[in-house]
Image: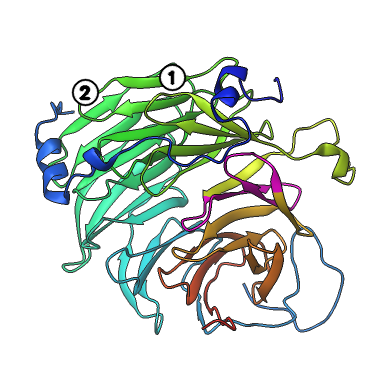
């Protein structure tokens, strides 16, 4: 791949900062309007901590301390995913290797709902926009939706192997991506269905944009598609020289959905204007400054990406343990935050310049993106952290780990 962004797009910006990529003020509908729009869619039916100090091994790491406020230990296998309910941030849902998902209270760990009946590891578990429902999906493609108040299963459907699962931001509509290249969209609980078909390449990651009218999906062959949810067609297809040269691993959008940042196993993150489908930026590590590894010939896969809401910055997490904080417009790396093990996931706080990371070494870390310095580090897991979620206020985090546990960490900072 050419390491430089397309010449015609870079020239549009030069060295100047991106002030505004697209004006979406006239595209900011109210939730009721979005729900009405969707009504018009032509749906078709269709473990324990060790006490002895010792060397860390690949299979088990000894936890020297536990900084958590609460440990949720109902799962009988690795915990793969965790989400907080968007309405109150008072409930968490976790899914695990034991073929179950649990909805539980963050304050005391009380189980509110046990999601059973799955046939494989639950790798996706997410709340609806109003927190009234939760969807759980397993690796084999069985998806279930539950009413949290009544604790009843209200809908289920089986697709090909599941890659990702996400609720619409303001309607009772559920979307999923599968390894046969399809994106599915259902009205819940009626189950009316629409499919978005592409070439037979895994739909590895997906995100509904904030306008509720479009979704961005990344594929195993390096292609990115911007789908029009109402029309059912791909408004933009980014592939070939503009696309990635490896499977998409992650993507994220900025607050108004005008920009999407994609990450791939090819070691590049691309900035895409969702209105035009043009690649307007590209981020990569300066390999000359990275210490050599045993796998120099392999690209440094990107595992997670995200936008800062208050500053023109993006963060990119790499498998070699590097967290890169880049200037949005110039694509210049502002800070390199090094971890001793691979980063699994990153998340920016809603209204600050703090970006948090979870790592294969079992630690959760908070970084100040203004300075590139570490602000806090939290331990307690005896295995890798596979996912985490932070509440809107940035006061606590809930983790999911390979040690069969989920933990709640109180995030103490000097500025609070």
- Where residue 36 sits, quadrant-wise, is top left
Q: Is residue 355 magenta?
A: no
What residue is shown with label 1?
Answer: 237
* Left or right position of 410 against 338: left
Residue occupying the point 14% across, 30% down:
41
Examine the rendered structure and indicate whether residue 150 appears above or below residue 264: below
- Where residue 356 sits, quadrant-wise, is bottom right
Total marks in image: 2
Helix, strand or loop at label 2? It is loop
Q: Earlier in the sequence, mark 1 or mark 2?
A: 2
Examine the rendered structure and indicate whether residue 235 appears above or below residue 120: above
Residue occupying the point 41% across, 80% down:
109
Examine the rendered structure and indicate whether residue 162 appears above or below residue 148: above
* Left or right position of 112 against 62: left
Give the magenta-colored segment's residue range. Answer: 307-333
Q: Is residue 311 magenta?
A: yes
Residue 43 point in image, percent of width and height: 15, 28
* Left or right position of 1 against 304: right
What residue is shown with label 2?
Answer: 231
């Amino acid at each position: 791949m050419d390491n430089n962004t397309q010449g015609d797009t870079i020239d549009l910006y030069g060295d100047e900062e991106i002030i505004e990529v697209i004006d979406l003020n006239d595209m900011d509908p109210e939730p009721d309007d979005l729900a009405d729009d969707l009504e018009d869619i032509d749906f078709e039916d269709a473990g324990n901590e060790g006490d002895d100090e010792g060397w860390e091994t690949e299979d088990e790491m000894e936890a020297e301390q536990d900084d958590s406020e609460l440990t949720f230990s109902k799962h009988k296998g690795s915990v793969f995913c965790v989400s907080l309910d968007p309405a109150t941030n008072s409930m968490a849902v976790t899914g695990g290797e034991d073929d179950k998902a649990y909805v539980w209270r963050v304050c005391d760990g009380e189980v509110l709902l046990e999601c059973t009946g799955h046939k494989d590891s639950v790798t996706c578990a997410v709340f609806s926009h109003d927190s009234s429902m939760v969807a759980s999906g397993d690796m084999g493609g069985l998806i279930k939706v539950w009413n949290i108040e009544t604790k009843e299963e209200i809908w289920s459907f089986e697709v090909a192997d599941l890659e990702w699962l996400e609720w619409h931001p303001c309607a009772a509509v559920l979307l999923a991506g599968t390894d046969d290249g399809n994106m599915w969209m259902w009205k819940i609980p009626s189950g009316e269905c629409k499919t978005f078909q592409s070439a037979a390449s895994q739909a590895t990651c997906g995100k509904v944009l904030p306008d509720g009218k479009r979704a961005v999906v990344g594929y195993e062959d390096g292609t990115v598609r911007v789908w029009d949810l109402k029309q059912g067609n791909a408004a933009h297809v980014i592939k070939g020289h503009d696309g990635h040269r490896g499977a998409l691993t992650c993507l994220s959008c900025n607050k108004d959905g005008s920009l999407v940042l994609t990450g791939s196993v090819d070691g590049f993150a691309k900035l895409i204007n969702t209105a035009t489908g043009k690649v307007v930026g590209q981020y990569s590590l300066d390999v000359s400054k990275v210490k050599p590894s045993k796998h120099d010939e392999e690209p440094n896969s990107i595992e997670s990406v995200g936008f800062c809401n208050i500053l023109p910055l993006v963060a990119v997490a790499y498998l070699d343990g590097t967290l890169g904080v880049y200037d949005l417009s110039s694509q210049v790396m502002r800070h390199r935050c090094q971890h001793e093990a691979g980063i699994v996931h990153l998340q920016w706080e809603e209204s600050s310049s703090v970006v948090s990371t979870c790592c294969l070494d079992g630690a959760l870390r908070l970084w100040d993106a203004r300075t590139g310095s570490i602000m806090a580090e939290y331990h307690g897991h005896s295995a890798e952290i596979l996912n985490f979620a932070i509440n809107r206020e940035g006061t606590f985090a809930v983790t999911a780990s390979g040690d069969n546990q989920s933990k709640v960490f109180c995030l103490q900072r000097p500025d609070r």
